[in-house]
Amino acid sequence: MEWNALPTSLTTDYIKQYLQDLPEPVLTLALYEKFIALKSTSLSLSLSLSLSLSPSPSLTKFIEGLASELDEFIRVMKIIIEELPLKNKEFLRLLLLMCSKIVENQETSKMSSSLIAAVLGPHLLDSRQPTSALEDMQTANFIVESMIIFYDRLF
């Protein structure tokens, strides 16, 4: 199959369907609460506000002022990622690499980190509970967007 010959929307649909069909989310049910807890840090709240307002290169300047908090946020996220099963971790690494490349070319792809996270977040980090709150979905999007933005520091 020639992936680059397929429309982007069809490729995205294949990836989403694959993630939905997995017996467990890539970020695993066992680590769900740890990933969700990342959102409660003060840096996360600042990043979340910034990401929701303007997911753009201006985020980098904002983050530079929070360097030590950012280092801690990334350190904790790396620790949690390391707890993933090896296959999950490798799949996540490759998926996030692809996402980071798409974001690097967002003028052509028309896909920002926040758009990609909105598509993939609920499928990568999911409690698999039918009553999952909208807040949990927004948190999943935030976590996945952070992983895309900080890919180079996480892997």
Image (cartoon, rainbow, N blue to C red):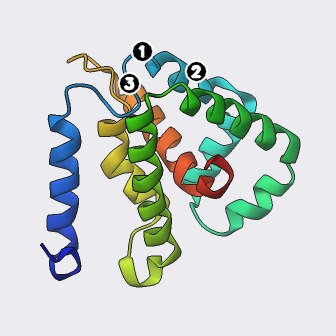
Q: Please state which amino acid type lies under the numbered disc 1.
A: Ala
- Asked if marks 3 and 2 touch (Cβ < 8 Å), the reply is no
Q: Amino acid under label 3?
A: Thr
Query: Where residue 119 appears, x then y in whole percent?
Result: 31, 51
Q: 74 left or right of 139? A: right
Q: Which residue is mark 3?
A: 28
Q: Residues within 10 Å of mark 3 (few under 14, many from 20)?
A: some
Please name whichever residue, 92 or 58, is drawn nearer the observer in this view of the structure.
92
Q: Residue at x 66, y 69 (%)?
A: 57
Type of amino acid under label 2: Ala
What residue is rendered at 23% in x and 41% in y? 19
Residue at 44%, 21% in the rendered image: 32
In the image, is 92 to the left or to the right of 9?
Answer: right
Q: Mark 1 or 2 closer to N-term?
A: 1
How far apart are the alpha carbons under marks 3 and 2?
Answer: 14 Å
Expressed as whole percent of the image width and height from the top left, the position of residue 68 reads 87, 41
- What residue does disc 2 label? 37
User: Mark number for residue 30?
Assistant: 1
- Calculate the distance from the C-alpha at mark 1 to the C-alpha at mark 2: 13 Å
Q: Is residue 117 above or below residue 121?
A: below
The answer to whether 35 is drawn above or below residue 70 in the figure is above
Gap between marks 1 and 3 measured at Cα: 5 Å
- Earlier residue among tags 3 and 2: 3
Q: Nearer the viewer, mark 3 or mark 2?
A: 3
Q: Do labels 1 and 3 touch, CB within 8 Å?
A: yes
